[in-house]
Amino acid sequence: MDSELKNNLRQHLRKTCSAIELKRWYDPLRVELDEERGEVSVLFPHAFFGAWFAGAMRERFEAEVHGFLGSGLVIRYGSNGRGHDTAEHPVIEETRSVDFPFGPEFTFSSFIENRKNYFPLTSAREVARQTDVEFNPFIISGPAGCGKTHLVKAVANEMAGRFGREAVFCASLEELCNLYEGTFGGDYFKARSHVCSHRFLVVDDFQLVGRHRAFQAELINLFDSFYNGKRQMIFCCADNLPSYEFLDPKLKSRLEWGLIVTLKEPDLEVRVRYVERFCTQKRLPLSRDRILTLAQRFTDLRFLQGLLLKVYAYREFVHADLSDRDFDRILSQTAGGVRSDMTPEAVLDIVAAAQGLERKDLTGLRRHQNIVQARQMAMFLCRELLGCSYPALGRIFGGRDHSTALYAVRKVRKSMSEDMAFRDKLEALRKKCESGD
C-alpha cells in the first residue's frame, strides 16, 4: 500500500517536477499513509537530508500532498536514525498540518521571487517561522498586482500549519469591519474579544481604513492588545501605509514601530516566469513568442492570471489547436487588452479631451492643478496599458526626468486607493483608451 501511495504521489508530482528533481528529493523519502488517523509519515534517509528538505522542499511538498490527498491530514516528519544529531543538523521530528485554510495556492514556494523582492520574501518567511515576536507589526506594502496578498496569505498558511487554523485571524479590512457591524451587531466588546482570542492577526487591504476612519480607534485597541501580549500582527497595504494623511496620529506612530517591506511591481522576468509556471501546471503549450507577448502587454499578475485561464479554457473547450488568429482575438476581446493601434499619443489625446485640455498642455510646462492631475493620469495609463518604461514616459511627456514619471504613477495609485470618485474617473478614461472612443 505504501509503495503504491508513493508511486501514485510521484505521478502527481510529475505534473510540476522533472524526473531529475524527483530523483533528487522525492525518491529518497519513505512515505506512509495511516488513513484511520489521517496521518502521512515521511521519513528522511538521515538528519542532514531532513535539515535540507525543511529549508528547500517542505513547503512545495506539503502543497502537493494537499492537492493529491485533500485536506484534514497531518504530516509527521522523522529520520530513520542515521546521521548525527547536532545543533546544526538535528534529527527532524515534527508534526505539521497540511491544511491550507487561506488557499493552497498561497505558499512561499509558489511566490515568484527575483532580486528586487528577495528581502520582502525572506522577511515574511522569517516572521512566519520565528518563535519570538521580533518584528511587530510586520507590514507588506506595494502596488496592485505585485503579490502582496499572496505573500500575506502564505504567512497565514505557514502559521496555521504550525499552530492550527484556530490560532490565526485572517481577513481584509472590509471583512474585519463587517465582522464588527454585521456578525456581532455593533457589539465592539464581543467582536474585540473574538479577534483577540487568536494568536496572530493578519489584515489585508489595510489602506481601506480611509473609508472607515471612525474604526481607527478600535484598530488602536486591537493593536495594543496584540502588541502588549507579544502576539504577531501582519498588515498588507497599497503603497507606504504610514504616509497616509488620513491616519490617526496614534495609529500611525504604532504602525511605524514594526518592520515595513515593499514589494516592487512584477517586472518582465517575473511575469515571464509566472506565465511559464501556469503553462507547466495546466500543460498549456504556448510558444515563447506568445509567452513574451502576454508578459510584455500585461503587468498586473491578477489580470494576467485571468487572461491565462481564458486562453486555457478556449483550448480545452473550443479548439485544441490555438491559432495565431484565435490567440489575437482572445487578447483583443479581453477587458484591459491593448488595441493594436493604441499609442501614447492616443492616450494623451483622450485624457486631454476628457479634461478640456489639449495634448500640448500635458507635454508642456504649465503647473496648474488640473493640468498636473491630467498629466499624471495620462502617465499612469501609458504605463498600465502600454507598459512604457519610466524613462520612456519622461521622453513622451516633454523630456521630463524618469523620477517625475515614477512619482506620477505612485501618486495616481495612492489617489485610487483613497478616493473612489478619482478611481471611477480613471476607470472611465481607461475604458475610453481601450475602446478608442
Image (cartoon, rainbow, N blue to C red):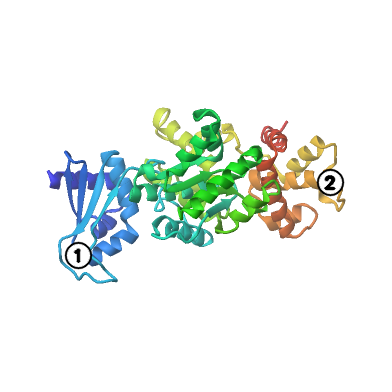
Between 421 and 390, the one lying in front of the other is 421
Q: Position of residue 129 (x, y in %)?
A: 39, 57
Between 274 and 213, the one lying in front of the other is 213
- Which residue is drawn at the image coordinates 72% and 51% (left, top)? 408
Can you say whether 273 is above or below 357 in the image?
A: below
Looking at the image, residue 63 sits to the left or right of residue 127; the answer is left
**Dot 1 lies on which element?**
loop
Distance of mark 1 from mark 2, alpha carbons?
A: 68 Å
Looking at the image, residue 286 sits to the left or right of residue 259; the answer is left
Does residue 290 appear in this view?
no
The quadrant of the rendering that contains the N terminus is top left
**Dot 2 lies on which element?**
helix
Q: Residues within 10 Å of mark 2 (few under 14, many from 20)?
A: few
The kind of residue tagged 2 is Gln
Q: Position of residue 42 (x, y in %)?
A: 21, 53
- Which residue is drawn at the image coordinates 42% and 30% (left, top)? 319
- Kindly identify which numbered label has been placed on residue 46: 1
Does residue 124 appear in this view?
yes
- Which residue is drawn at the image coordinates 40% and 28% (left, top)? 317
- Kindly identify which numbered label has been placed on residue 214: none
- The residue carrying mark 2 is 369
The quadrant of the rendering that contains the C terminus is top right
Q: Position of residue 173 (x, y in %)?
A: 55, 40
Q: Position of residue 126 (x, y in %)?
A: 43, 60
The kind of residue tagged 1 is His
Can you say whether 325 is above or below 135 in the image?
A: above
Between 244 and 359, the one lying in front of the other is 244
